[in-house]
Amino acid sequence: MTEWDEVVEYIRKAMEAVDEAHGASEELKRNTNHDTFKAFQVKMDELHERLSKLKAVLDNEEAYTIDELMDALSKVYSGHQADYRRTPRMK
């Protein structure tokens, strides 16, 4: 899977997290108690995490692109991914 595919996957997962957080907020509105509030907090934390990962990639798009290119070239010439990266691997 290329890093572009992973960005697309991050977007898909962020959209799912938005839907889940929205569902939790609706349940909290209908039935306000400690358990629904806790469930809402968990879903909002998941959404925050997914959006933070996506933002990190988008803020460093050029660096991720260069690292992906270097990985591809390294695989062609040496058979393994590049040893050095400016960005963390997505997986």
Image (tube, helix red, strand yellow):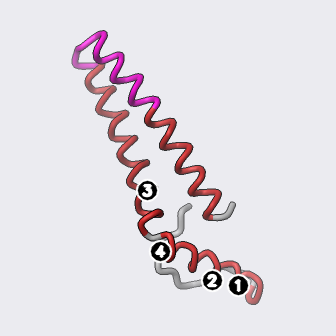
Q: Amino acid at mark 2?
A: Met
Q: Which residue is mark 1?
A: 73
Secondary structure of the magenta portion, mostly?
helix
Compute the Cα span from label 2 to label 3.
22 Å
Q: Residue at x 56, y 61 (%)?
A: 91
Give yes or no for residue 80 being in the magenta stretch: no
Compute the Cα span from label 1 to label 2.
5 Å
Neighbour tally class for label 3: few under 14, some 14-19, many 20 plus, Cα within 10 Å: some
Q: Which residue is mark 4?
A: 87
Residue 23 to residue 72: above or below: above
Q: Residue at x 46, y 63 (%)?
A: 58
In this view of the protein, which residue sits in the foreground, 50 or 38? Answer: 50
Q: Answer with mark 4 or mark 2, whichever residue precedes in sequence.
A: 2
Q: Which residue is mark 3?
A: 53
Q: Amino acid at mark 3?
A: Lys
**Callout 1 touching callout 2 (CB < 8 Å):** yes
Q: Which residue is mark 2?
A: 70
Please provide the residue range marked out in magenta: 19-35
